[in-house]
Image (cartoon, helix red, strand yellow):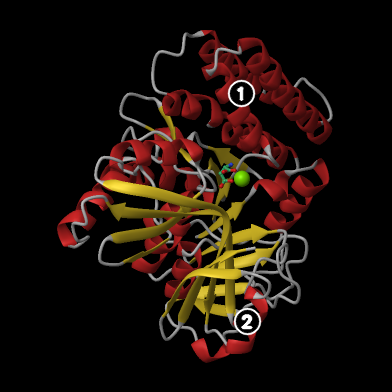
Amino acid sequence: MKVFKFGGASLESVERIKQVAQIVQSFPDDKLLIVISAMGKTTNELEKVAQNFYMRKREIAAQLLYNVEQQHIQVAESLLGNREHPLFQQLQQFFTEAEWTLGEKPLRAYDYYYDQLVSMGELLSTAIVSAFFNTIGLSNTWVDVRDVFRTDDNFRDANIDWAFTQKQVTEKVVPLFNQTNIVIAQGFIGSTDQNESVTLGREGSDYSAAVFANMLDAESQTIWKDVEGLKNADPKLFPNTVNIPEISYGEVIEMAYYGAQVIHPKTIKPLQNKQIPLLVKCFLDKNLPGTVIREQADVRQLPPIIVLKRNQVLLTLTSKDYAFITEDKISDIYETFHRLKVKINLMQNGAITFSCCIDHNPEKIELLIKALHNDFKISYNEALELLTVRYYQDGLLEDLSNHHTVLLEQRSKVTVQRLLKK
Ligand code: ASP
Ligand code: MG
């Protein structure tokens, strides 16, 4: 059994969906569990539907939803050649459910509505791909992963109930392979025990695939992308990037942790726990070597790995009464960040100051200031970049920080991080 994951970019046009089909056709002898995300930028568009609905701009929300509907119907029509196929009824059902949600008064928290609306992207894309595959002889079974992935009700970042989900995978998904060699499921979504839809965090389909790989004891997971494989830096930000042929789980976790948008950070653990290799391959040319991620990989082969996180803020707290910022205060500060769900990307403290770098989010900063201003004087510095280089070489570091002021720096033997201001 192999697990494949295809992301939004691999489904952004009719041609690309056909390319995906060719990839799948080249594995005729394998049992494949295929996890699919929403087509192209659908998730972003559905986010706008949710925002407008919540701001009670119902007409705009309805118009945006209509656009998403039309795009999907057009793709489905191009792939299937007509509108007679039962797929169109299935799509209509998803749209009707979303329209019902838009008809409600937004009485619950925003994150709840977000999940009810945004989860539709994956339901639409998988239904279309599944129907198309069946018409071209790639016989497959479509599953609604909300009947399989049980989570808590932490909307937009739901946590999987591992035991219940394993039971569902064993009892409901495994038997499907007796009927077809291919099973198609949605990434990114799941459901609570109240049958409310949830999402697992943006870009969460990699993680969904890893959960399936773990629970099915797959021989490997492959993430099919429109790039050659994993690179040592984001090619959109840096020239002369190189492909990394092999790398360890640990290294990829670090890269993701520092902000590389390569693979969803939660993806590695379920794979590592069962020693399942993760392959990153290019669906535009499957003969390219790609990247293998596994337990052991030779670090001596690694180029310097560069991660740049933009739009950072340096927040500095100074204790008003000159009380030292030691363990007890730090624990209070962390408690506040934790409660407000603000992630600290880098931190440093002195006698009466605590500095940290966080993503720019004006609402969260306001809440932090509200919560902490009694004890601390708070200042902040915006529009910064957090540069992380692993296996750094000094010349390179200077080149990358050129024309910038370094506001904060941390170095270990392997990693250097610099908070930069232009
Ligand atoms: N469609 C979701 C997103 O764009 C999940 C994913 O792509 O992995 O965030
Ligand atoms: Mg996506």
Label 1, on which residue?
A: 49
Residue visible at 57% across and 85% down? Answer: 302
Label 2, on which residue?
A: 398
Where in the figure is residue 233, as x and y percent of width and height?
64, 70
Left/right of residue 147 with respect to residue 68 in the rendered view = left
Q: Quadrant of ligand 2?
A: top right
Q: Is mark 2 within 8 Å of ligand 1?
A: no
Q: Say if 398 sits above or below 279 in the image.
A: below
Asked which secondary structure carries label 2, the reply is helix
Asked which secondary structure carries label 1, the reply is helix
The C terminus sits in image quarter? bottom right
- Residue 249 can be seen, yes or no: yes
Query: What number is the disc on residue 282?
Result: none
State the image quarter where residue 4 is shown. bottom right
Residue visible at 41% across and 82% down? Answer: 412
Near mark 1 (Cα within 10 A), the count class, few <14, some 14-19 or many ≥20, is many
Measure the C-alpha gap from mark 2 to mark 1: 44 Å
Amino acid type at image mark 1:
Val
Where in the figure is residue 20, as x and y percent of width and height?
72, 52
Q: Is mark 1 within 8 Å of ligand 1?
A: no
